[in-house]
Image: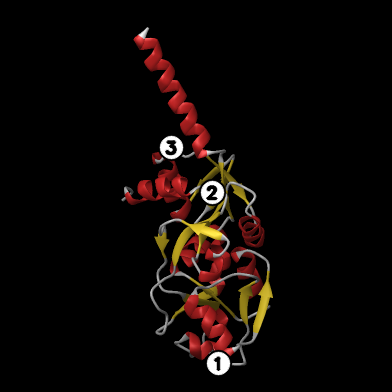
Amino acid sequence: MRFLLFTFLGLMALQMRSVAYGETLQLIYEHRPPYQINKGNGIVEGVLAGRVAKALDKANIEAKWIIHPSQRQMETIKKGNLHACALGWFKKPEREVFAKFSDVIYQDHPQIIIRRALDTHEIEHTTLEGFFGDPRYTLGVKSGYSYGAFVDDLLVKQTPVVMKTSTNIEGMIKMLLGKRFDYIISTPEEFMGLSSSLGAAMNGTVINELSDAPSGNKRYLMCSKKVSDDLISRFNEALALLH
């Protein structure tokens, strides 16, 4: 009888734990090598996605990976009616008003410029401030996207010539090579990922390291207010145990 009682209480505890943790977490992301790579059939790999998947597994958090463009990710988190987190976003004060953030998942290397290789003889700038201050060249940026505090502030301060697009980074490279704009801001990690995913097309590009680029941006899970503090805490604890 005592054994049956303990078994019943154990099952009840598991059920209560399941209820407390809520429904399956929707983990929304955009295909963006090398950070998150959609392999098909629900399999997602990458520098960020791999660490997140390991932490979720270690924390016993059930999650479903859902691919959405960045603007839709932001809308989902802002609405706050889904049990969802968006992968790899920067933490900014204005975002903390409507979202919760995990601990740091990954910190980028300092940002770089990607430009067309054939323009090598034309562009002599070694700083982002120099690029932004030169009206001969157009910067390609993703609509509604943050490039981190340093770049965002400099964009406002210097108002360079800008062309906005809603396409992903691979599409932006194609636009760059098609001379829709002259340069984009990226990271060394992303450049290597693009070299792998786009292959020979990347032979038409080169990079500029920037002497004024600060330490790389930190990336987080950005979660809706519906995601419990307990779940985020469990994720953070598991993340801290990863090597």
The structure's colour scheme is secondary structure
210 or 80: nearer the eye? 80
Q: Position of residue 24 (x, y in %)?
A: 56, 39
Rendered residue at 40%/84% (across/down): 211
Q: Which mark is residue 133?
A: 1
Q: Which residue is mark 3?
A: 60
Q: Position of residue 153 (x, y in %)?
A: 52, 82
Question: Of discs 3 and 1, which sits in the foreground?
Answer: 3
Rendered residue at 52%/46% (across/down): 44
Look at the image and tell me whether residue 33 can be seen.
no
Q: Secondary structure at mark 2?
A: loop
How far apart, in angstroms, are the residues tagged by discs 2 and 3? 15 Å
Q: Position of residue 27 (x, y in %)?
A: 55, 48
Q: Which residue is mark 2?
A: 227
How far apart, in angstroms, are the residues tagged by discs 3 and 1? 50 Å
Q: Which mark is residue 173?
A: none
N-terminal of the pair, mark 1 or mark 2, is 1
Q: Position of residue 63 (x, y in %)?
A: 53, 41
